[in-house]
Structures are given as structure tokens and as C-alpha cells.
Amino acid sequence: MNIPPDLDLDQDLDPCPNSDPTPEPDPYTSTRIQFGLELRKCRIMSGFTQKKLCTAIHLSISQLSMLENGHRAPNRDLACKIDDTLGLGTALVDLLDRLERAAAQIPRWFRPWLEFERTAESLCIWGPLIVPGLLQTEDYARAILSRNPGITAQQVEENVAARIDRQSILRRPKPPMLWVVLDESVLQRPIADSAVMKDQFQHLLEVAESPRISLQVLPYSARSVVGLLGGFTVADMPRSRPSVAYIDSQTIGDRVSERNEEIKRLEFRYDLIRVDALSRYESLGMIKESMQKWTT
């Protein structure tokens, strides 16, 4: 997400106290981008050009541009200096503290994936064990996350909130296209009590009504073994950027891959899985049948 620079850095801009020059940041985008958006908005509202602010805080215009565009990580000392110069009290320092606390709840290896997921044009998702996070209900997610060894009740709620926040990309005016294939076992495995399971499958039926979400089920009868090693997601990126993959595993290592050969293998596996899956119509019928099981 790039923010256009000021049109004229040598002339002061007129303050615009009644306007909002930047869109509200996505609720689950990166710390750098959220801070940069707010910084630029505060600077313009205070009547400062980039040049005027840079002169006051002894920073180069290129460094400030990188900060406002989210290409440079902010730090507390610089945020404090800008707060003082723009007369903001502790607004930017407080924002940075909140963003860093929120980011601390997300595993470091997973953070790059959030940016790929947020900007992807389409996501091809294979779910062999559980409903993928982007389609989970809050109670279903809580049932899964609460089973992590040693986790506290507070951490569970923070992780649930983070997972639900990720789903905001599906509520955008133009969300990414989702191509989702679930194994039939996902419909049969009792993750939680019957009410939670029923609500989760009802949610799947509702989201499947979207023209930008394709939901299919791979039945036991297909005898497919291609995807049994684990779930994965392949993100098709815009502007001819190479695809990226998120790979489920039981290790604590990096599970985000940009290696071309690995991406190609996963795409080939996904095609083989999807060709053996039921049609969308048949898949929704199977989900409805599963709901009846959990209802009774």
C-alpha cells in the first residue's frame, strides 16, 4: 500500500481540519503501514509539508517518505519527536505502543504471510483437517486455540480476536477470490460440541453464497492421498509478482515459502486435489447433510 507523496514539498499545504486525507487503515495490516497512514494524516492536519517537518526534526525527506509509505519501521524516539513538533501530545507514541502490543500476539514467522494474504488477488486453500482460519467462526476458533499446551485464557481470547480480524479482507469492496477445498473428514471430526459444529457449517453455507468464494469437498470415495501430508494455501499475488505459499506443519520453523519450485509443486498438488473434489453444488449438499448429523 503506497501513499502518494506531497505534490509540492517546497510550499506549505493549507490545513484541512474538516477533511480526512487518508483512508482508514485495514484493521489487520502491518504496524508500519498503520503508523505511516496516521503520521501522514496528522502532519497534513497540522499544516506541515514533508519538508517543514523534516527541517524541524532533522530528518531527510526520503526517510520521512519511507516512514509514511510503510517502508520504514517507526521507533519510539522518533514518534515522540514528531508528537512534540506537531503538538499531538502523545498520540503517535500511544499508537505505536498499541500496534506493537497487537503485533506481539502474532508469531514472528507468520507476520510476512499476513501481508501476502491481505494483498493477494486469489487464495487457493486446501484444508485436510479443520476449517481454514479465514472461514472459522469465533467459537470454532476458540475450541481449537484453547487446546494449545500451556496457553492462558487471555492468550486464547487475544488469538481468537486476531484470527477473526484476519477475516476482514473478505469484507472489503473487492476481496480476494477464495478457492477452498475441504476434506470430508473436516465435516466429521468433532472439534467442539454439536452447537458449535452446526454454527460453523451454517457459516460455511452462508459464505459460499459469495461469488468470490468457491467451496468444495473432497470425499472419502475419491481415495485421494495427494493432500494427506498437510494443509496449505497458495496466494496469487498482483502485478505479476510471484506466488507465495503458507504451509501447515507441526514444526516451529518458518512456514511461509516464496521458493518457486516449492510453489509449483503445491499448485500441482492443489489441482490434483480439486479435480477429485465434488462440484460446488454437491459439496454444499454434503455440508447440509453434515449439519443434520450435528443437529441430531
Image: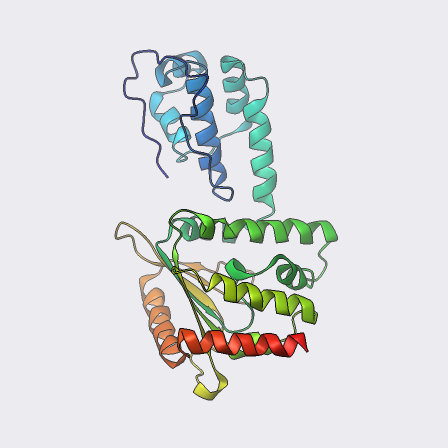
Q: Residue at x 56, y 30 (%)?
A: 95
Locate residue 137: give its quadrant.
Answer: bottom right
Locate residue 13: give its quadrant.
Answer: top left
Q: Residue at x 61, y 49 (%)?
A: 161
Q: Quadrant of the N terminus?
A: top left
Residue 246 in the image: above or below residue 91: below
Give the left or right position of residue 160, taking residue 15 as reference.
Answer: right
Q: Residue at x 42, y 60 (%)?
A: 210
Q: Position of residue 284 (x, y in %)?
A: 48, 73
Q: Quadrant of the C terminus?
A: bottom right
Residue 68 can be seen in this image: yes
Q: Residue at x 34, y 25 (%)?
A: 62
Q: Position of residue 12 (x, y in %)?
A: 34, 11
Residue 223 can be seen in this image: no
Locate residue 7: give its quadrant.
Answer: top left
Q: Position of residue 231 (x, y in %)?
A: 48, 69
Give the left or right position of residue 58, taking residue 206 as reference.
Answer: left
